[in-house]
Image (cartoon, rainbow, N blue to C red):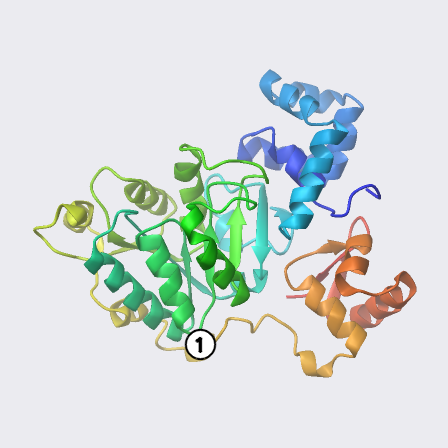
Amino acid sequence: MSQFSTAFVYHAWLSSAMISPVRLSLILEKYGNPEAVFSAFSKRDQYLAETLEPVERQRLSTNSGSSFLLRMDTLLSQYSIRAFTRAEDIYPSLLKEIPDPPAILFYQGNTSCLCGRLLSIVGSRSASYNGQKATRNLARELSNHGVTIVSGLAGGIDSAAHWGCLEGKSPTIAVTGCGLDCVYPAGNLKLRDELLAKGGLILSEFAPGEKPIGWHFPVRNRILTGLSVALVLMEAQIRSGSMTSVRHALDQGRDVFVYPGDPDSVHFEGNHQLLREGGIYFTTAQDILEDLRWLDNPSGIGQNNDCAPDSSSFSKDELAVVTALRPGPLGFEALTAAAGLDPVTLLSTLTMLQIRGTIEALPGKAYQLNR
């Protein structure tokens, strides 16, 4: 790993094969981590030869060369992209419960967002003015009640949901259908930057370099709904990607709240069909908060960083390490660079933080915050 500046190159390599999440999870369970899979693959391991489809073996073989790995290293470092697997503590517990949870997730930003009360909002990209206004107002009010809004960073309803949440007190989470080096649509670059600047999180199942191909988005939607306790449908026609999200949510056993909208508008046809089929009617944030029983316990109000340690009790070096680990686990070499400490100082600082129970050591000389 010394030739790479980030510990997540092999996550990108393994993801590039587009192995089904279920089989990829089994492979990772056997070998422990993507780097171990790379080592086994390089040695022509028999289990991998029997488990992988020919096209998957070909992709992994093609991408095993230094040119691909160095390109991934550059993208991961340039865009501050990290990754975690389903086996790690950072992985959201609700997401583990869905039928086909992603085996690897790439991310930018603050993973402590995942500790909060998560609610997904979806709707049309070509949404009406009234639909976008209602979404922004709803997301703002929910955010002020400590709810972290999850959406897809697309135009229309997604953008309104993220912006509304950012105008409140809570961070927002985006799940994208492309690699995190790409912003899609390009017009949402400002939204992406604001989301990260205000302590939010962006997730993707797709490795850096993956473009926003059409089939990525229905696949992405299962993650968007799987992260949250419930889904809110703001505006959708009957045949739309938003209705795909609804189907995922229902398959995952999630509640689906449906905004009624204008009964005479084609923009809300999907909403009215779903209401006839048993969707939960709501008109205000209060309705949702009452149904989810989130009004009874206001402890979630704020930036949802109650999972983060209190910085006032740390020395300067300890705070540097804690800050570097807040987005997720890091190996020793990557942590040295992220914290700006020399190896000797870092080692003694890690020892003190472990004694205090602030961090824990992981296999492969890596570390993460105790949450």
Q: Where does the C terminus fall, quadrant-wise?
A: bottom right
Secondary structure type for disc 1 = loop
Residue 307 visible in the current orientation: yes
In the rendered image, which quarter is residue 26 located in? top right
Q: Residues within 10 Å of mark 1 (few under 14, many from 20)?
A: many
Q: Position of residue 246 (x, y in %)?
A: 31, 46
Q: Position of residue 103 (x, y in %)?
A: 58, 41
User: How many numbered marks appear?
Assistant: 1
Residue position marked by numbered label 1 in the rendering: 301
- Residue 102 located left or right of residue 285: right
Q: Where does the N terminus fall, quadrant-wise?
A: top right
In the rendered image, which quarter is residue 318 located in? bottom right
Q: Image point 37% across, 72% down: which residue?
A: 294
In the rendered image, which quarter is residue 163 located in? bottom left
Above or below: residue 291 compared with residue 274: below
Point out the residue furthest to the bottom here. 312
Q: Image point 24% across, 63% down: which residue?
A: 134
Q: Nearer the viewer, residue 295 or 84?
A: 84
Q: Image point 84% across, 44% down: which residue?
A: 2
Point out the residue furthest to the right here. 344
- Residue 359 located left or right of residue 226: right
Q: Image point 75% across, 79% down: which residue?
A: 314
Q: Position of residue 128 (x, y in %)?
A: 21, 53
Q: Position of residue 258 (x, y in %)?
A: 23, 55
Amino acid type indicated by mark 1? Ile
Above or below: residue 337 compared with residue 203: below
Residue 199 visible in the current orientation: no
- Residue 240 located left or right of residue 354: left
Point out the residue furthest to the left here. 264
- Residue 315 located left or right of residue 266: right
